[in-house]
Image (cartoon, rainbow, N blue to C red):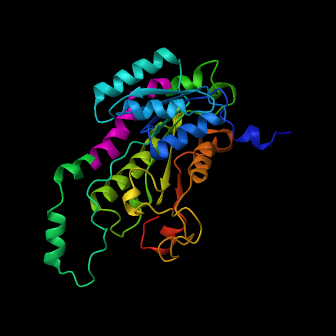
Amino acid sequence: MADLNITRLFNVKDMVFVITGGGSGLGEIMASALDANGASKVFILGRREASLKKVAENAVNKTIIPVVCDVTSKDSLSAAATFIEKESPFVNAVIANSGAVGPVTSLPPRPADATIADIQQQLWDTSYDESQTALSVNVLGSFYTFLAFLKLLEAGNNHDDSRGKKDFIQSQFITTTSMGGLTREENPGYPYMASKAGLWHLTKSLATKFAKLGIRANSIAPGLYITEMTEFASGGQDWSVPGSLPKDFIPMTRTGSKEDIAGAILFLCSRAGAYVNGNVILSEGGVVSVQPASY
C-alpha cells in the first residue's frame, strides 16, 4: 500500500534546486522552504551578492548556495550553469523567479473624471526603459534560464542518485508568473501585465513541447504578497493579518504569507505534485474571482 504520510509526500529530501531572484522576496521564501524540508542543494541566483549570502547564512540546514548571476545576460547564465554543474551532476527543478515591475500607473488610483488626454499623458510619460526591463527580465530572462539549465534538468531524470530516477519525480521548470497576467484591471501597470501573460503562455508552451522529453513546466501565479518589490503598495503596513483589507480588494481580506508560497513550492517540487504538468497555481486570495479576468 502506498505511503501517504505527509512527511513522505511533501519532503524534497536529497533534491537539487536552482532559484533565480533568490536573494529576496518570494525567491528567498522558496529557497528557505526547500532548505528546511530536506533539499540537498539550493542554488540561489541574483545580482546582489550580499543579499544572496544573507539568505544562505540564515538557512536552517545550510544547503543554500549563492551564485551571482544576471538573468538578462546569456553569458552570465551560462557561467552560472557551468559553476552549478561542477557542484552537482543534476538539477531536479529550476525556478525562474526573477522579476521586474516596470512603471506603476495604477497607484495612486487615477481620478474618476480623468479624460483620455489625462490618461494618455500619464502613460506616455512612463519610462520606456523601465517597461523594456519588465519584458526582458520577466519573459526573456525566464526563457534563457530554462535553456541554460536544460542539460542539468535532463540529468535530473537519469542520474542514479537523483530522485527523478529513483522516485520518478520528473524534472521541471517552474516560473513565477502573477495574477497580473490574468486580470484585466490596470494592476500595477500594462507592461508588467503583458510580461506576466507572456510568461504564462511561455510556461504552457514549454510544457507541451517538453512533456514527451520528460521535462515538466508549471507556474505559481501570486497575487499581492508584500515583498521588497511590492512594499510600495502597503506603505509599511502589515496586511497579512485577516481583516486588513476590504473584500472588494482581496476577498480573503489579507495578503499572501510565507506559508502560502512555501506550501505551493513544496507541493510542486515534492512527490505530492509529481503528476502535475502544464499547470498554474493561482495564489491570490480570490482576486481573479471578483475582477474581470481571463482564467
Q: Is residue 285 above or below residue 149?
A: below
In the image, 245: left or right of 159? left
Q: Report the number of discs.
A: 0
- Can you name the residue that lies furthest to the front here? 236
Percent x, y of residue 32: 57, 38
User: Dividing the image into 4 quarters, which one contains the N terminus?
Assistant: top right
- Residue 70 at what x, y percent from top left? 32, 33
Magenta segment: 134-152
Q: Position of residue 83 (x, y in %)?
A: 42, 18
Residue in the picture at 69% in, 37% down: 11
Q: In this view of the protein, which residue sits in the foreground, 161 or 22?
A: 22
Check the image and name the residue furthest to the right.
1
Q: Which of the pair 283/231 is nearer the observer?
A: 231
Residue 124 in the figure: left or right of residue 151: left
Q: For the point 50% across and 17% down, which residue is it?
A: 87
SS assignment for the magenta stretch, majority = helix
Judged from this view, the residue extending furthest toward the bottom is 113
Which quarter of the figure has residue 67? top left
Residue 104 versus residue 219 in the image, above or below = below
Which of 135/47 is in front?
A: 47
Whether residue 233 is situated above or below residue 97 in the rendered picture: below
Q: Is residue 136 rendered magenta in the image?
A: yes
Residue 135: x, y in percent?
A: 28, 48
Q: Quadrant of residue 234?
A: bottom left
On screen, residue 101 above or below 12: below
